[in-house]
Image (cartoon, rainbow, N blue to C red):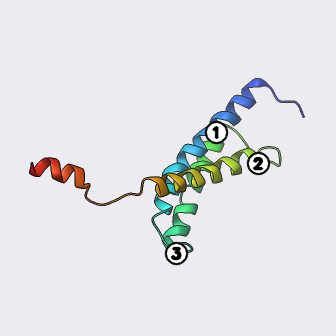
Amino acid sequence: MIYDSAFYWHLFLASITTFFINLPFGYFRGGFKKLSFMWFLMIHLPVPFVVIVRRFHHLHLTWVLAPFLIGSFFLGQFAGRKIYSWKPYRKGNSNIQKTITN
């Protein structure tokens, strides 16, 4: 099957957008207990957004596209989780509080 260059651009943009949509969800998933309700929610909540992106680019989920789109989905989740382990979210930033009190 031969595709034109516009198809590859749409695939690239959809994959990058899928990655960046999943990045914050993977980050927030890192703060929840594994296999909890919120953990599952952070995995499944971005799915409708990814479907909208895919339809915007006129891409149908086929065996050719599945590795790119599903792979970018899970890479975004994985990268977000790694960012959380590197820099976890904390309520009340102590640096800001120290600056205000000084």
Q: Camera-side residue: 102 or 89?
A: 102
Q: Camera-side residue: 47 or 30?
A: 30
Mark 3: which secondary structure?
loop
Q: Residue shown at 10%/52% (left/top)? A: 101
* Mark 1 / mark 2, whichever is N-terminal: 1
Whether residue 64 sits left or right of residue 6 in the image: it is right
Q: CA distance from mark 3 to mark 1?
A: 29 Å
Q: State the image quarter where residue 68 is shown.
A: top right
User: Can you tell which mark lies on residue 67?
Assistant: 2
Q: Camera-side residue: 6 or 35?
A: 35
Disc 1 marks which amino acid?
Answer: Ala
Label 1 near label 3: C-beta < 8 Å?
A: no
Q: Is residue 38 above or below residue 13?
A: below
* Mark 3 / mark 2, whichever is N-terminal: 3
Disc 2 marks which amino acid?
Answer: Pro
Disc 3 marks which amino acid?
Answer: Ser
Q: Residue shown at 80%/25% (left/top)? A: 4
Q: Residue shown at 52%/75% (left/top)? A: 36
User: Can you tell which mark lies on residue 36?
Assistant: 3
Q: CA distance from mark 1 to mark 2?
A: 13 Å
The residue where tag 1 is placed is 14
Whether residue 57 sits left or right of residue 28 in the image: it is right
Q: Position of residue 86 (x, y in %)?
A: 47, 53
Q: Position of residue 52 (x, y in %)?
A: 59, 46
Q: CA distance from mark 3 to mark 2?
A: 27 Å
Circle 3 residues within 10 Å: few <14, some 14–19, many ≥20 = few
Q: Residue furthest left?
A: 102
Q: Position of residue 23 (x, y in %)?
A: 53, 49
Mark 2: which secondary structure?
helix
Whether residue 63 sits left or right of residue 53 in the image: it is right
Q: Residue furthest bottom?
A: 36
